[in-house]
Image (cartoon, rainbow, N blue to C red):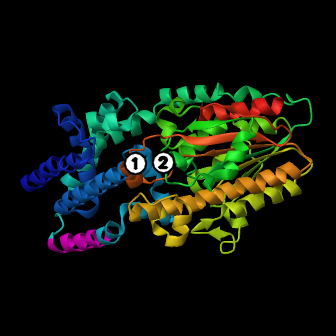
Amino acid sequence: MIDFIVILFSTIGFSFLPERLLKPHAPKITFKNIFQQGPIITLIFLCLTLIVQRPIFSGIAIFVFLVIMLGVSNTKFSTLREPMVFSDFMMFSQAFKHPRLYFPFLGLAPVIIMPLLIIGLIILVLLLEPALAFTWQRFLATPLAITALYFAIKRNALSSPLSLEPVIDNTELGLINTVAAYLFQSRTVSHKEKIKQTLRTAPFYSLSAHKKTIQRKPPNITVIQSESFFDARRLHPSIKTDILKNFDHCKQESVQCGELNVPAWGANTMRTEFSFLTGLAYEDLGFYRYYPYEYLSDMPVTSIASALKQQGYYCVCIHPHPASFFGRDKIFPQMGFDEFIDGSAFDTKADKFGPYISDQAVAQKVLDVTQQKTDKPLFIFVITMENHGPLHLEKIDPQEQASYFKSNSLSAKQDDELGIYLRHLNNADQMIKSLKTAYSKAQQNTLFCFYGDHVPSLPKIYSENEYDNPNSDYFIWRSSKKKSSNIKDLPIQSLAHLLLNEVRN
């Protein structure tokens, strides 16, 4: 028993060491933090020991898990400017289903070596450490201790003051305490009721309850959420201006255009997407802001799609990736979409450009849907994939690379990654041209909205060029209405309102 206690307290003590590696938000070591983290580590320790009956193994496993978790958090922060948050644990299954979207950011060596080390360590410890002798006292006492610890952890977590800014909260409480506090507080009845009230008063709630607010023949509406799109010419003067010439033409003829303030940097598309569709600000969602589709899939969520559907529109989402990603297949029907066209509708070989379905193939799918559905006005919401990272896994030859730059003033390695990004950005620009050309010739009046979900993940390039602007870009263009554009920067939650106002005009 003494050995067991020594191992337990050693595990608790060592659990604080990895958190000193957090960058740049290493937590303060206070008695309160130790008092709150101790029960969490003890609970995990007892659960593991109850299963494997080997306390040394449990202690080592906890330490290794914390090192991995904190390493992932540091990688996420350097790439996305956000540490690990509690909802990231809900996305682990997505990482294994779609490894190319996640694991390359960790680096090849950790992804290969770490699992081998873990497997080797498990085998070694299990062989060397004998299992604890079975006793009825231990068998009965451990579940009671686990239950008591759970309620102690819950009480501490519910009483922890939070800012909902992960860096601040991690610094004050530590990552483990912060994850626990977010997890428990997000599931309180009061928070769920607050979110339900937010959804009941959401901008599109009243619109979805009333039919036919549009008196005349409504236009078709196409909205392109372009993956990792922003005007990269802001990043460095060496980038050629004609890389986005079609984007520029649409801006010049648009109803309105400008920079778009989005709640994501480098990834987390669903945050921008949810704010656009619902008209709700990122901050309105409380703890659910980090992964809204997971936590709101069982609540009534109105959107621009549900509002337009009540006005006679047929609402289609086109996304060249599995519909189950982020749980869109569950929540999009309740948001008002009649149809979801996902990656299964594309040719996985012919329609690809790079590792993903090309923007041009998506543009053609949009035009096909427009021609097929003629009995109702259409709302088509598109989520592109071509420009999704990790960009450093792709290759570019020097001749193509040089075609995107006026001069070579970046390091060769960073030039390569930026050149790959500009290749896909140019394809997004060609997508704009294809749709604009088709809509200009069509008899049906069409509203065409285009925006980027977030800036791409290019941390080294941002650092070298001291670039710190999180905004993407947008425009709203109308086939029947050519005029000088109104230039105005917007938050993403206002873009759908602007689009609906244009529908009524």
Q: Majority secondary structure of the magenta segment?
A: helix
Q: Would residue 29 be found to the left or right of residue 368 on screen?
A: left
Q: Is residue 493 magenta?
A: no
Q: Is residue 107 visible?
A: yes
**Which quadrant holds the C terminus?**
top right
Residue that appears at 37% across and 47% down:
84
Q: Mark 2 falls on what kind of element?
A: loop
| Alpha carbon separation for disc pair 1 and 2 | 7 Å
Percent position (x, y) of residue 86?
A: 40, 44
Residue that appears at 59% across and 51% down:
241
The disc labelled 2 sits on which kind of residue? Leu
Residue that appears at 69% across and 69% down:
351
Q: Is residue 154 visible?
A: no
Residue that appears at 87% across and 42% down:
445
Q: Residues within 10 Å of mark 2 (few under 14, many from 20)?
A: some
Q: Would residue 47 be found to the left or right of residue 466 on screen?
A: left
The answer to whether 133 is drawn above or below residue 448 in the figure is: below
Looking at marks 1 and 2 on the same chain, the residue that comes earlier in the sequence is marked by 2
The answer to whether 126 is drawn above or below residue 477 in the figure is: below
Question: Can you identify the residue that label 2 sits on?
Answer: 235
Q: Residues within 10 Å of mark 1 (few under 14, many from 20)?
A: few
